[in-house]
């Protein structure tokens, strides 16, 4: 009997010890962890590798208990590699549930409106959150600039494909709700107009009015005379001259120069955002035909050439007060004239006009190698699909 009694005593002690261990383990499993503040950690591999990574990063104190918890809850095979955000004092159970859920940390990547496809590809290639290559530079005007949230390690091509799909959906939606009297024949022409509007103004509530200027000009058979179209005709997807537009370039024949060609250029000059697309589809109801900088960051609009010339003179007074004599024109802009270039009057009327969207100088340098150079630190080679005219013979 003594041996049997000893055996039962041992079993009882073992059961009590196991129960106590389970109880204490459960308490520790749900107890606040060691993290003093929120922390992002990249985890990979199986349970033991993940547990060691978490211990090394200070997320947990008891890697063995973490592994036992994985097996006890059946989540050992549910762990998903990725970058996770662990909250301050996260318990072992909370840490385990986060990794098993696959709710990886998402990072915002903002691609501003008005960039060319080549410029967007350049930014994506420089972003170290992303991985892999991009098969080719997408056609101009086929990407939707937006803030995208992506997990670390997202393939660059996946994000490009997402931008294309979002753009396609947005254009279909905007085109379906366009002004029925719009003088545009297709969604492609809408994108072209929206890209010009996007490049002409960064003031959100001005976009519909800027769009109205160009729509009114199209209706009257006037040349659009948009400075950004000169630039795109000269440099294509690179996006900027890095200097003011030379007088000799205003009337230089390129397929995109709307000081020379009638109507819209043959394709977009950038990737417009949703607001510019909506502005082009539903422009303001105005009779405006001209606009020029007003000194506040926006523009002064006018219906007649005389009004426009008065606005130009006002801008001249403002720029004279701000800038030293002889300052170069604003980067990628024509210095505005009162009389302007040929082609801004409706067909059949005397040719005396001012440019639709001329603006005065801002003093900064965006030439090659400077901090504002949009292609600074570009370390890869892209072959643009655009046929860019030879600019080697340009002279002032």
Image (cartoon, helix red, strand yellow):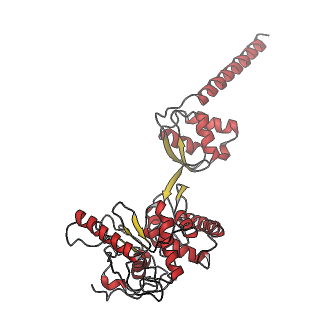
Q: Quadrant of residue 274?
A: bottom right
In the rendered image, residue 258, in percent from the top left (x then y), is placed at 44, 82
Give the residue displayed 62% in from the left and 24% down from the top: 24
Q: Is residue 271 visible?
A: no
Image quadrant for the C terminus?
Answer: bottom left
Query: As rendered, which of 32 and 137 lies closer to the eye?
Result: 137
| Residue 183 in the image, given as x and y percentages of width and height | 58, 78
Left or right of residue 194, residue 330 in this image: left
Which residue: 50% across, 54% down?
108
Going by the picture, which residue comes out furthest to the left? 325
Residue 112: x, y in percent?
46, 62
**Left or right placement of residue 312 versus residue 138 in this view:** left
Q: Residue at x 42, y 72 (%)?
A: 380
Residue at x 53% of width, y 43% of height? 85
Q: Position of residue 262 (x, y in %)?
A: 48, 86
Q: Is residue 6 above or below residue 128?
A: above
Question: Which one is in front, 70 or 334?
Answer: 334
- Depth order, front residue of 326/88: 326
Quarter of the image for residue 302 reads bottom left
Tell me if residue 96 comes above or below residue 133 in the rendering.
Answer: above
Q: Residue reaching furthest right?
A: 1
């Amino acid at each position: 009997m003594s041996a049997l009694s000893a055996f039962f005593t041992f079993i009882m002690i073992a059961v009590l010890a196991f129960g106590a261990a389970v109880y204490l383990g459960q308490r520790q499993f749900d107890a606040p962890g060691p993290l003093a503040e929120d922390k992002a950690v990249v985890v990979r591999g199986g349970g033991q590798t993940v547990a060691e990574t978490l211990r090394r990063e200070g997320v947990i104190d008891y890697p063995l208990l973490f592994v036992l918890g994985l097996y006890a809850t059946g989540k050992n095979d549910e762990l998903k590699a990725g970058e996770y955000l662990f909250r301050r004092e996260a318990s072992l159970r909370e840490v385990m549930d986060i990794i098993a859920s696959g709710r990886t940390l998402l990072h915002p990547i903002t691609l501003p409106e008005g960039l060319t496809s080549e410029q967007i590809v350049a930014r994506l290639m420089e972003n170290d959150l992303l991985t892999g290559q991009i098969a080719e530079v997408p056609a101009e005007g086929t990407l939707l600039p937006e803030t995208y949230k992506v997990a670390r390690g997202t393939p660059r091509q996946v994000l490009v494909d997402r931008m294309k799909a979002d753009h396609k959906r947005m254009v279909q939606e905007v085109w379906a709700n366009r002004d029925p009297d719009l003088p545009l024949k297709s969604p492609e022409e809408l994108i072209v107009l929206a890209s010009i509007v996007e490049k002409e103004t960064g003031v959100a509530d001005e976009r519909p009015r800027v769009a109205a200027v160009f729509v009114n000009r199209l209706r009257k058979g006037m040349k659009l005379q948009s400075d950004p179209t000169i630039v795109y005709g000269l440099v294509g997807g690179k996006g900027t001259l890095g200097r003011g537009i030379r007088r000799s370039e205003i009337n230089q024949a390129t397929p995109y120069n709307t000081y020379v060609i009638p109507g819209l250029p043959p394709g977009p000059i950038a990737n417009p955002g949703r607001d510019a697309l909506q502005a082009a589809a539903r422009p303001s109801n105005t009779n405006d035909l001209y606009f020029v900088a007003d000194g506040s960051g926006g523009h002064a609009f006018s219906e007649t050439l005389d009004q426009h010339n008065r606005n130009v003179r006002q801008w001249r007074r403002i720029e004279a007060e701000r800038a030293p004599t002889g300052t170069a024109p604003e980067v990628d802009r024509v210095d505005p004239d009162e009389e302007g270039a040929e082609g801004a009057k409706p067909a059949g009327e005397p040719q005396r006009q001012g440019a639709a969207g001329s603006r005065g100088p801002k003093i900064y340098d965006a030439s090659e190698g400077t901090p504002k150079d949009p292609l600074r630190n570009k370390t890869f080679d892209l072959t643009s699909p655009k046929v860019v005219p030879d600019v080697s013979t340009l002279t002032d």
